[in-house]
Amino acid sequence: MSTATALATVGIRTFDWLDYLVLGAYLATNLVVGWRWARRRQSADGFFRGERRVRWWAAGISFYATATTSISFMAVPAKSYATDWRAIGSAPAQAAATLVIAFCFVGALRRLNITTVFEYLDLRFGRAVRLLGAALSVLLKVFGRMSVVMLLPAMALASVTGFNVYACIAILGGVTVAYAMLGGFTAVLWTDVFQFVVMFGGVAIALCYVAAGVPGGFGGILETGWREGKLAAVSWEWDFTEPTVWVFAGLMVRTVFTQLSDQSLMQRVFATADERAARRTVALGALLGLPSSVLFFFVGTALFAFYRTHTAPPAGLPNDAIFPFFIVSELPRGVVGLVIAGVLASAMGALSSDVNSAATVIATDFLPLFRAQPTDRQKLAVARGATIAAGLAATLTAAYLASLNVPSLWDQVLMLAALIGGGLPGVFALGLLTRRATAPGVIVGVLISVGVTAWLQAFTSINPFFQGFAAVMTCLVTGYGASLCLPSRAAPRDLRGLTVWDLARTGR
């Protein structure tokens, strides 16, 4: 039974007029923000980077909101509900990696004055590698992350309204694409700030209701979690199939290059006014991730403690449905709408950022293939059309995923990211860490990386976190080796400001 089907089976139509009013006000606010910015005269650079005038703290919140999705809001509590806290090691690993980016790489990338991270690949390796990286990025965003991010809150909305889950996917995708298409980057940025407040308000309210239903409140939750072994958070075993310290060490290395290759995140860096603001943006995004991860994992433990003293969820209910089921069956009317708004906020921030970044990549990296010198108006028109196309493709993919029986959507996202996108961070690692990597070697590295990752997923039980690290290292090692062996007809490139060995030699 798919998660969507399970929720439809056990769902209770608890929405009344107050819930619809709260949720409607939330959705309308997002559209109003998009419409407000659409009314202003907008350039292509404004649509892509907010004309590099955004406030660092807003960009930092948006950086966090882009990285924190409905996967965190629903799939992470489901993970800690079903298992324990060992997967939380990903939070400090990713935060440390993000701080490395803030203080080691942000300044150099800012000085290149680029709109997409793939323009860096053009400077470093040439157009072929730039287009390969851009294509992998768009595929991963549209058919991977965006579709799952859209599906999870749509399931929650379907469970509390009785609407068909496919209709909920269409509503969520339609509203998000509308304000992203109308207002561009600036609308996405400020709705991210609004959604940040709504998301954590929803989590806090839901958690208070869970604690109120557990004997001893928050202390009772911790006591139950400790007694049942649900708070185990660190594993030092040499086991790469489980979330161990060694797996997260690899994750930290991988995350440095994953985030550097993520246009959705780096777009916030490129939109700030100067290098100091860019560093503060990334650092704030990193620091917000630590307490929020603790909060989301605690929600799962709290739900476990709650259902130890209350009627257990229906047999066969997928883990990813446990939080929506609690919202449906335990929260009072009026509060349900507010918490569901928080669930939607966790998705729409990341979804709008991804669809805007995909449009930016298409208009910046692919449009010049067809028009050598596109005008500002042409770039803007293509970007808006690409926003609609990417949103539609992600919506259809989410509808397909809704019909499948997937045990853990979080694990599936990690595996898909390793398979499709694992080679992409490896390309940036080759570009930044080596001086002798060439375009032919990079392409060989990407192809071998995809093959090795597919083999790991098919024939081993290695943890999805470690699959991504293996993909990056495979691309780095084989790509460098191939670069030394394969001839390259390209003239030697000016590497000033493009590798860690040449960052001080900008001159651009």
Image (spheres, rainbow, N blue to C red):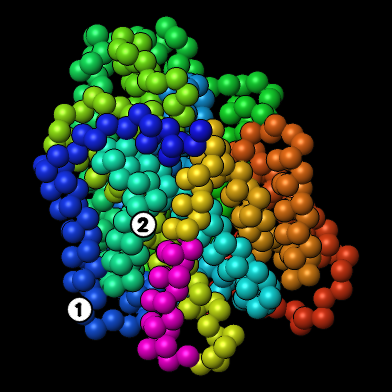
Q: Which element carries disc 1, helix, strand or loop?
A: loop
The quadrant holding residue 131 is bottom right
Report if residue 59 lies within the magenta region. Answer: no
Q: Report the mark closest to the observer, 1 or 2.
A: 2
Q: State whether the magenta stretch is mostly helix, strand or loop.
A: helix
Image disc number at residue 39: 1
- Magenta-drawn segment: 374-394
> First in sequence: mark 1 or mark 2?
1
Report if residue 380 lies within the magenta region. Answer: yes
Residue picked out by circle 2: 170
Residue 229 placement (x, y as % from top left): 47, 12
Q: Residue at x 40, y 67 (%)?
A: 356
217 lies above or below 438: above
Q: Residue at x 24, y 45 (%)?
A: 341
Q: Amino acid at mark 1?
A: Arg
Q: Residue at x 54, y 77 (%)?
A: 365
Q: Which element carries disc 2, helix, strand or loop?
A: helix
Quadrant housing the C terminus:
bottom right
Q: Amino acid at mark 2?
A: Ala
